[in-house]
Image (cartoon, rainbow, N blue to C red):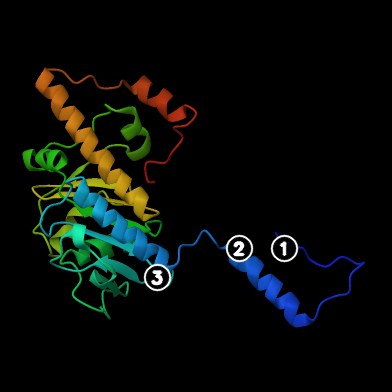
Amino acid sequence: MIILPSMSHPVPPLWTLFRIFAIMDRMNHQNVPSREDLVAALIDVCRRLADKDLVVATDGNVSARLPSGNILITRSGINKGDVTESDLVEVRRDGTNASGKPTTELRMHLFIYDRRRDAGAIVHAHPPFATAFAVAGIELDEPVLPAVVAELGGIPLAPYATPSTEEIPASLARFVNSHTAILLSNHGAVTFGTGLLEAYFKMEKVEQAASIIYRARMLGYVRTLSDDDVARLRSAVGYQRNPRG
């Protein structure tokens, strides 16, 4: 706690007041992550992806928006379980001034950041069950799991686009403004949120939903929520979240 001088105490020198207000300003902005915080969080998310088998070999990519507005993103050709700070590349929002060779999916990340100014982080992975749905051409848009409905809305399927090309942003254009989790046909999935853990947890939730729905189909029946179920869910305490994240 910072205590300003009272009338019973002498007023401190002007430079001291400036220092006090500078500290107070930093305290007011302490929730803004520093570059160092983002580096640590990005490495942590990469290792979580590898540990959960949501990516293999050198698949997948992760990025975060820096306080400067630039983008910090994983480099090309690195196993996510082995990522260190030296494997992170900084680029401007237009993709220039790269400090190394960024992931080949850079265009997808830049497109999402441009369209969604509320996005602070993006995760692209190849989760097995979710990717199986994407290969089969099946969206995860039916209301089945309450947590998915409340937090993500539906999970649409973007049409097939050649990875690492401008086709990917074009395929996402219909969905990126209204969803924060999207299946990529014959490719994988992409999720985004205000921060790295939020984006990562959405990827976990996509894969869990796909896994559960797959198993329910094997059992022969998937019960979907009715329109009334969904309406009550979205108005219930604890579920008043915007599907946009």
Q: Is residue 179 visible?
A: no
Q: What secondary structure is marked by label 1?
A: loop
Report the Cα–Cα distance between label 1 and label 3: 31 Å
- Residue drawn where x is 40% and y is 68% of the image: 36
- Which residue is under mark 2? 27
Q: Amino acid at mark 2?
A: Met
Q: Residues within 10 Å of mark 2 (few under 14, many from 20)?
A: few
- Which residue is under mark 3? 69
- Residue drawn where x is 35% and y is 55% of the image: 196
Report the Cα–Cα distance between label 1 and label 2: 10 Å
Name which of mark 3 and mark 2 comes first in the sequence: 2
Name which of mark 1 and mark 2 comes first in the sequence: 1
- Which residue is under mark 1? 2
Residue 156 position (above or below residue 13): above
Q: Amino acid at mark 1?
A: Ile
Report the Cα–Cα distance between label 3 and label 2: 21 Å
Q: Is residue 148 visible?
A: yes
Q: Are marks 1 and 2 in contact (CB under 8 Å)?
A: yes
Left or right, 209 with reference to 227: left
- Residue drawn where x is 23% and y is 46% of the image: 182
> Whole-percent x and y of residue 203?
26, 45
**Which of pointers 1 and 3 indicates the residue nearer the eye?**
1
